[in-house]
Amino acid sequence: MTQNSLSKAAVVERADQLDFPSSVVEFFQGYLGQPVGGFPEPLRTKIIRNKPRIDGRPGASLAPLDFKKIKAELRSKFGKHITDADVTSHVMYPKVKELTTECVGHESKPRCPQVFEEYQGFLQKYGDLR
């Protein structure tokens, strides 16, 4: 909005034509829960377009997870060093966890140097959160 010098009215009016980041779309879908008073319409409908919407608590409709099975799958793919914390990270952030796990010990893989550079920047800014 700011980057493109759009007013609030322009965003609401053109929301069905604008390219929003996935984080914004997922927020309006309801993946992070519901704001007090609900989402503003027609903005929500314009932003999510034909994507599914979640009304109510996001986790209420999820099927139970078999953590032991997921851990076994991750260990067969990445090795025996996978911990329960790794499984939890994978369940919540599968793309991020898979990429970082894939790169550990394999820094020469094509996309891994960028992953480690970003990770080092995170560590410098926030420290090790373990």
Image (cartoon, rainbow, N blue to C red):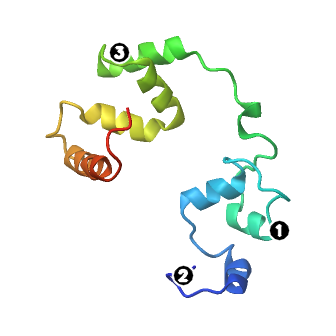
Q: Identify the residue shown where x is 77% and y is 56%.
A: 35
Please give left or right for residue 69 compared with residue 73 in the image.
Answer: right
Label 2 and label 1: CA atoms lie apart by 21 Å
Q: Which residue is mark 3?
A: 76
- List x then y, in percent, for residue 127: 32, 44
- List x then y, in percent, for residue 23: 56, 57
Q: Which residue is mark 2?
A: 2
Specify the amino acid type for callout 2. Answer: Thr
Secondary element at image label 2? loop
Give the residue at the far left of this rendering: 108
Label 2 and label 3: CA atoms lie apart by 46 Å
Q: Which residue is mark 1?
A: 41
- The mark nearer the N terminus, 1 or 3, is 1
- List x then y, in percent, for residue 59: 71, 34
Please give left or right for residue 113 compared with residue 4 in the image.
Answer: left
Q: Identify the residue shown where x is 55% and y is 58%.
A: 22
